[in-house]
């Protein structure tokens, strides 16, 4: 596991990985840290609002069980964002939060595109600051091309909570450098994210929350029936990728 230290940037106390890279503000305000994109949009308010919404979903207790395997538990609840459901998947992975969060971030900042079998592209559209970025993600087509590739343009905030919990918090946005492309259906991610919670035995509990509208003409019932299995496969692949990379 890489060492980290607390440093003050302006009036913000931040956690910095050895070798560079601010993980997140853990105390104080965030002045002097850029939150304005090259389009002139200040994403501070929006990204903080997204993280608050995702935190509330993480802390809520009214989830209903959807599917459980030996390694992964998937739950669901009615979404307040769209006419569908929010899903929560959780499992335990034998590694550190810092290591796991790296596998969840888009390339080249992270390794999402290198192991996620459902993804054909994972890239950064804009790095706004060390903790705030815009990404493009495109999925493979499915059912021998009958289901088109989906793509998403997301604002992602990396945030650290008390207890050394690391999280990603994201929501789909529009960005001039990430227009819709031919051959892909533009989907929309409502507020969601992943929490990496360190455990006393050195493992990490990983909780993933998604609220996704795939777009297109797919029947909602078909999409919803496929989500639990997709989340389980995501975690199986994530755990294997982390394991194959070696321990920190």
Image: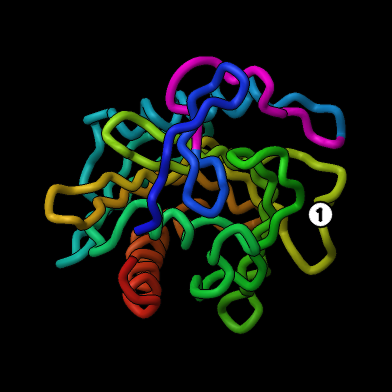
Please state the horizontal and vertical placement of residue 120, each as a whole percent of the image.
Answer: 64, 73
Quadrant containing the N terminus in the rendered view: bottom left
**162 or 61, which is in the foreground?**
162
Residue 23 located within the stretch drawn in magenta: no
Please state the horizontal and vertical placement of residue 195, each as a whole percent of the image.
Answer: 36, 44
| Residue name at image x 62 percent, y 20 percent | 10
Q: Which type of secondary structure does the marked residue at label 1 adopt?
A: loop
Can you say whether 97 is above or below 35 in the image? below
Can you say whether 185 is above or below 161 in the image? below
Total numbered circles: 1
Can you say whether 97 is above or below 44 in the image? below
Residue 83 visible to an observer of this rendering: no
Please state the horizontal and vertical placement of residue 207, each as a whole percent of the image.
Answer: 32, 47
Residue at the bottom extreme? 144
Residue 206 visible to an observer of this rendering: yes
Name the residue beneath numbered marker 1.
180
| Residue name at image x 37 percent, y 46 percent | 87
Instruction: Write down the quadrant of residue 245 in the picture.
Output: bottom left
Magenta stretch bounds:
24-38
Q: Main secondary structure of the magenta part?
A: loop
Q: Is residue 218 left or right of residue 243?
A: right
Quadrant containing the C terminus in the rendered view: bottom left
Please state the horizontal and vertical placement of residue 141, each as a whole percent of the image.
Answer: 63, 74
Q: What colour scheme has been applied to the protein in the rendered image?
A: rainbow
**96 or 61, which is in the foreground?**
96
Q: Is residue 24 left or right of residue 3?
A: right
Q: Is residue 21 left or right of residue 243?
A: right
| Residue name at image x 42 percent, y 39 percent | 5
């Amino acid at each position: 596991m890489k060492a980290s230290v607390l440093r003050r940037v302006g009036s913000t106390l931040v956690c910095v990985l050895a070798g560079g890279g601010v993980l997140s503000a853990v105390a104080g305000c965030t002045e002097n840290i850029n939150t304005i994109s090259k389009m002139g949009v200040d994403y501070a308010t929006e990204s903080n609002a997204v993280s608050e919404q995702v935190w509330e979903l993480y802390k809520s207790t009214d989830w209903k069980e959807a599917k459980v395997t030996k390694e992964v538990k998937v739950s669901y609840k009615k979404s307040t964002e769209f006419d569908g459901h929010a899903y929560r998947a959780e499992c335990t992975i034998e590694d550190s939060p810092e290591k796991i969060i790296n596998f969840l971030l888009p390339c080249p900042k992270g390794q999402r595109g290198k192991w996620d079998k459902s993804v054909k592209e994972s890239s950064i559209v804009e790095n706004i600051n060390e903790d705030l970025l815009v990404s493009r993600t495109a999925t493979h087509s499915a059912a021998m091309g009958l289901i088109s590739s989906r793509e998403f343009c997301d604002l992602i905030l990396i945030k650290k909570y008390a207890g050394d919990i690391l999280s990603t918090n994201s929501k789909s946005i529009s960005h001039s450098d990430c227009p819709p492309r031919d051959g892909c259906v533009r989907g929309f991610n409502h507020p969601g994210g992943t929490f990496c919670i360190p455990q006393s035995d050195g493992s990490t509990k990983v909780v993933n929350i998604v609220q996704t509208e795939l777009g297109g003409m797919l029947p909602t019932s078909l999409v919803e029936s496929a989500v639990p299995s997709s989340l389980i496969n995501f975690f199986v692949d994530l755990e294997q990728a982390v394991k194959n990379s070696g321990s920190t």
